[in-house]
Amino acid sequence: MSKLINAPIAIFSYNREDKISNLISSLLECDGFYNSKIFFFCDGSKNEEDLEKVEKTRKTIRERLNGNNNVCYIEQKENIGLAKSIYNGINYVFDLFDRVIVLEDDLQVNKGFLNYMNLALSKYQNENKVFQISGHFFEPPDLNINKAIFLPFISTWGWATWKSKWKGFNLEKKISLTTWNNETIREFNLNNSYNYYYILKGVFKNKIQSWGVLWYLHVFQNQGLVLYPNSSLIVNRGFDKEATNTTKSNSFQKETKDLVEINLPSEVKFNSDTFETVSKYIKSINKDNLITWVLKKINFYR
């Protein structure tokens, strides 16, 4: 199996030329980018109308990274959708490497993103309870912490994992929910801060498409933890069009061009008080359906 100092980066794109160009620009400013293997997974066009956009997006990617010999391009002839694209893409990388950093085209990363990801992937690689590293964090205004924290739910917004933790995850896997009691459902719903259980049932009934909730289920069943930075290293630019006349995205996105350095905890420990603060914050922004809007924008439903 191939090994690099830095984890490979899997980037998923479709037809948003401006968004992918913005992501590339932010990555180029990250320390370690040129020492990382990059995999671009480009989905195929859904129809003739999208074909030109898809081709322009692919052309832009190649032009922006011209001369970088560490880049691999995997371009689909037909549209397979986001869920299969991510699932197949990560499996592709895991045939070659034992870890991966995952990004979608509408994200922008902080200069310290790759450093944080690679340090965390190395530090916690042998910790059985740690299933994922997240680059994003919903920062409750009343939470005062000076280092990264472990929480029991996943992120789909700039994240990383290991092959050993991905093993056993399958998009087609279904389980019986009849054995889940109220306490299990409450726990899965993050102290009833958001109804992930409803989404999961919808997926099992083929009424909702969400790879994210299935990945969360995998981590949940294994009693896994996710490392979150105390200061978010991700900004989602996918809000631009819908957020032109609204402040929704600004209420949970903090942006800085300065280098953000994250201190990693020496001990893998779940803090129930911190989790209570975070879950209450999620519940508070869910009151006006903001969290539903956010989850849709970050592709949790796709």
Image (tube, rainbow, N blue to C red):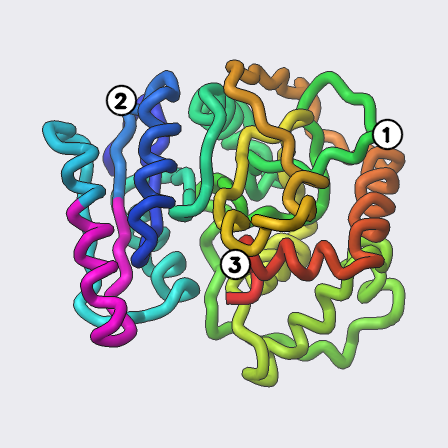
Other-residue count near label 2 (Cα within 10 Å), few / some / many at <14 / 14–19 / ≥20:
few
Q: Provide the residue span drawn in magenta.
A: 40-59
Q: Which mark is drawn over residue 142? A: 1
| Rendered location of residue 162, percent (x, y) | 45, 41
How far is the residue under mark 3 from the one under mark 1? 27 Å
Closer to the N terminus: mark 3 or mark 1?
Answer: 1
Q: Cβ–Cβ below 8 Å for labels 1 and 2?
A: no
Q: Nearer the viewer, mark 3 or mark 2?
A: 3
How far is the residue under mark 3 from the one under mark 2? 29 Å
Disc 3 target residue: 299
Identify which amino acid the numbered label 1 is placed on.
Asp
Residue 6 is one of the magenta-drawn residues = no
Disc 1 is placed on an element classified as loop
Left or right side of 282 for 85: left
Disc 3 is placed on an element classified as loop
| Rendered location of residue 51, percent (x, y) | 20, 67
Q: Which mark is drawn over residue 35? A: 2
Disc 2 is placed on an element classified as helix
